[in-house]
Amino acid sequence: MARIASDPPAGLFAAKCGHARTARVAAFVVLAFAVPVLAQRGETPPATPPPDDPVNALVARLEFESYKSTVKGLTQFGDRRQGTDRNRAAIDWIEAQLKSCGCPTDRIKYEYQPPANQGRGGAGRGAGRGPDQAQGGGRLRGIRSRTGVNTDPMAQPDEKLRELNTQPSTPGPREMVYCTKVGITHPDEIYIVGAHMDGHGWGEAANDDGSGTALVMELARVFSMRDVETERSIRFALWNNEETGSQAARAYIAQRGPMQGQEDPPGSGRYPEPKWLGMVQHDMMMFDHGMPHADGSTSKEQRPEADVNIEFQASSKMAAESQKLAWLFEAANEKYATDYPAAVGNHMTNTDSGPFQDLIPAISLRENERGAQIGAGWDPQWHQPTDVFATYTDKDFRLGLNAAQTTLGAIAQLTGATVRK
């Protein structure tokens, strides 16, 4: 079995914690030099953000290289398959990064015993669908490519990565980690911002879901800066066992749902589990290269018309409230994302927001529609040995950064974020 580093380097994530002034200066320098250059080319420069908008100030603190570095840090644990030492080491590493930025952490502990007849998707995922019906609803259209989970270790040509991923999953105790930004005026209300940190397929799970995990960690880094305050609380959740049916999310709901809004101890102003206002999931954020070609291949370059897909589930009990939340995120993308627009869809499926969708407003952000596009082969790295850091270009990572800008902009508005001067 490959050795897993017990104290891996923190990378840019920890190095940037609390460095708010550096981020503001960097943003100013970029604007100062970019606007004259664009004008010389005859191009229209982007509108200068209003200086009194605290959300713009926070979005400017998201850093491209820090996002990439965090994805890279996660890949040192291989595919992070649940029930393995590499998964447990990754949880420890994630928690250390969150703590280094001053975001107080805690864990959910639960048991996972996989049913003997359960496949990859978890009980009930995709069952009973017609040949042209996509998971979550909608129709499969156009050219499709085969999808599935690679279970052949020899399909991974990198011997070191193959060795790292060799240990099989075993039933038993599981954990997930989360951290919390406590609101100043409404600590009893909270938005949950999540991604799943486990993967499989004998790769590095760089996109599924290192890209979403790194996004949530970057948001935790920014919101935990010393001069940032929010009126409402934010929970940054890194789910486990998503690939087997979102068991960590379900354990979270079962264990902490009944505690919502209860002050403990009474009169303390402390709320271990504030009332849930909404849940926002991030799952596969980087690869939007378009529909497969007739031969099953996909384009090598990120397509210029790539976008961030924001989905809610039309058949859920909270569909109206979730749709409203989705359009708020689309508006935040329009205002704060630098490169790629957002599109709203109504077929959210197969991710950790699913268990929440009948309880509270719940949405997911993705690179493509989960059912009709990813499920039809639009991402050839999905659960494959090729889902490694080296597969992706800066254009791919920039789509993930734009998703981070979208969520940060929306959550900052929803929680009343401000920057102390």
Image (cartoon, rainbow, N blue to C red):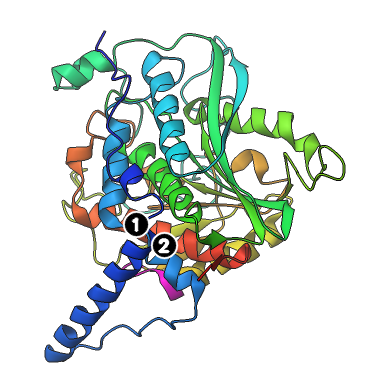
In what element is the residue under mark 2? Answer: helix
- Asked if residue 75 lies left or right of residue 176, the reply is left
Q: Mark 2 packing: few (<14 Cα in 10 Å), some, or many (20+)?
A: many
Q: Which residues are magenta?
A: 335-340
Residue at 29% from the left image edge and 35% from the top image edge: 73
Residue 136 point in image, percent of width and height: 55, 45
Residue 229 point in image, percent of width and height: 58, 61
Residue 70 visible in the snapshot: yes
Q: Mark 1 packing: few (<14 Cα in 10 Å), some, or many (20+)?
A: many
Q: Nearer the viewer, residue 187 or 392?
A: 187
Q: Work out how far the residue at label 2 is from the one at label 1, CA to CA, in angstroms.
A: 6 Å
Question: Of all residues shown, which one is farthest toward the front?
Answer: 421
According to the picture, the residue beneath numbered tag 2 turns out to be 405
In what element is the residue under mark 1? Answer: helix
According to the picture, the residue beneath numbered tag 1 turns out to be 401
Residue 64 point in image, percent of width and height: 28, 56
Q: Nearer the viewer, residue 164 or 126?
A: 164
- Asked if residue 96 lies left or right of residue 387, the reply is right
Residue 188 point in image, percent of width and height: 75, 51
- Asked if residue 38 lies left or right of residue 151, the reply is left
Q: Give the amino acid type for the residue marked by disc 2 in the picture.
A: Gln
68 vs 46: above or below:
above
Residue at 54% from the left image edge and 28% from the top image edge: 176
- Residues marked 2 and 1 touching at CB (< 8 Å): yes
Magenta-drawn stretch contains 337: yes
Q: Image quadrant for the N terminus?
A: top left
Question: Of all residues shown, which one is farthest toward the right?
Answer: 266
Magenta-drawn stretch contains 202: no
Q: Which mark is residue 297?
A: none
Q: Give the amino acid type for the residue marked by disc 1 in the picture.
A: Leu
Name the dominant secondary structure of the magenta segment.
loop
